[in-house]
Image: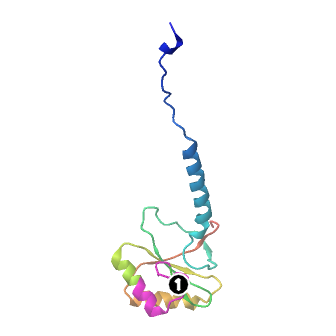
Amino acid sequence: MSRNNHKRRAKAEINVVPYIDVMLVLLIIFMVTAPLLKQGVDVDLPQAPANPLDVNSPEPVVISVDRNGLYFLNTSSTPESSLDGTTLVAEVQSALKKQKNRPVMVRGDKNGMYQNVVSLLVLLQKANIDSVGLVTEPGEDS
């Protein structure tokens, strides 16, 4: 008998090293992009104990009012640019026509004038947008 009579068997192993490399790259990408995914402009929100939105609800239409009374819309083609009242109402109505059950939320800067938020609410009311929520920072329970 010679040694050549032994048949060589193929090893059935899976090399997972490339998959680990891909997962690490994806993890790094998500860690870098997650902080960039904030909605709207930076406003200093008031604190209040409130219930969060339902996870299963559609993405809300978020209107931000900064301390100077400028309006910003997260569904706008340029969410970092301010909008006048007429343009804002038209874009909100357009977003709601595409998906009727989207919640409309207002983010008002706590250091801005209360009149700025009230003026926005009046604009939305005139546009027949009946349900509007106010966005706050989680506060301490009283």
Q: Which of 7 and 126 is in front in this view?
A: 7
Dominant secondary structure, magenta: loop
- Position of residue 47 relative to residue 55, above or below, is below
- Position of residue 131 relative to residue 89, above or below, is above
Which residues, given as a range, are shown in magenta? 74-91
Question: In which quadrant is the C terminus drawn?
Answer: bottom right
Identify the secondary structure beneath mark 1: strand
Residue located at (42% from left, 85% from top): 91
Quadrant in which residue 33 is drawn: bottom right
In the rendered image, residue 101, in percent from the top left (x then y), is placed at: 37, 72
In the rendered image, residue 16, in percent from the top left (x then y), is placed at: 55, 40
Residue located at (45% from left, 69% from top): 59
- Position of residue 141 relative to residue 68, above or below, is above
Q: Which of 32 and 48 is in front in this view?
A: 32
Residue located at (47% from left, 92% from top): 85
Which residue lies under the disc numbered 1? 72
In the rendered image, residue 40, in percent from the top left (x then y), is placed at: 55, 78
- Position of residue 75 relative to residue 51, above or below, is below
88 magenta-colored: yes
Quadrant in which residue 137 is drawn: bottom right
Q: What residue type is labelled 1?
A: Phe
In the rendered image, residue 34, in percent from the top left (x then y), is placed at: 58, 64
Q: Which of 38 and 60 is in front in this view?
A: 38
Q: How is the image coloured?
A: rainbow
Q: Is residue 101 left or right of residue 35?
A: left
